[in-house]
Image (cartoon, rainbow, N blue to C red):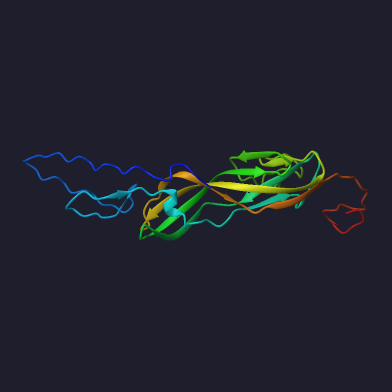
Amino acid sequence: MITGNAGGARPSPPTQVSNPNTTPDPPTCTPNAPVLTEECDHRDWFDVQVVTLADIARFRPTAGVQRMEPDGWVVVGLPANFYALVDPQVVPGELLGQPADVRFTPVSWHWDYGDGASATRATKGGTWAGLGLREFDATPTSHVYRSPGDYTVRLSIRYRAEYRIGGGAFVPIAGTIVLPANELRITAGGAKTVLVDRDCTVAPRGPGC
């Protein structure tokens, strides 16, 4: 899904002011200006072309990955922790006939939890341990299922895009791109307390673990 302005009006060239006593300076041609030049010399004003999301359609970041805790199952009435593995990526290629890089930066994460609820978050989340929390604590990206059953969880990640030519500075591109991550198929059920002969974290194969 691509949102935002996919095209741009052709800008008018700057107005030259005539001065009989001076010679006007030629335009400055730089490959990392906010527009790419189709032709740039010192004889005339050059044509310009705004880079849009349509221009970078062949550039794609590696798909993000979503994970959850506990892995593949949840306890009804307790938070299940969902999080994403995704970072900014620079994808090389060719843009308007020139070697270029496009940088994709994730900016928001939309979870569809499969039970009729959904949420858009400004963070990709993290593991309970990484957040300094205990198991089944609520997190910024957790969700509580109220009914037992099987669910499919879908994650869509929204990216901001920037481009650069010839290793220069990155220039933002208007709009955002939404790409899907992997799906998770999970089971929600009840929990019961059992007696064990020792700590399951020490002896995970012990009776009751």
Q: Residue at x 35, y 47 (%)?
A: 50
Q: Quick one: 191 or 16, which is closer to the camera?
A: 16
**Left or right side of 194 for 35:** left
Q: Residue at x 62, y 52 (%)?
A: 181
Q: What is the total number of numbered labels drawn onto the structure image?
A: 0
**Residue 168, picture quadrant:** bottom left
Q: Residue at x 58, y 40 (%)?
A: 122
Residue 166: percent from left, percent from top: 36, 58
**Residue 14, picture quadrant:** top left
Residue 86: percent from left, percent from top: 58, 52
**Left or right side of 150 for 171:** left
Furthest residue in direction left, as rendered: 21
Q: Quick one: 22 or 119, which is closer to the camera?
A: 119
Residue 180: percent from left, percent from top: 60, 51
Q: Quadrant of the C terminus?
A: bottom right
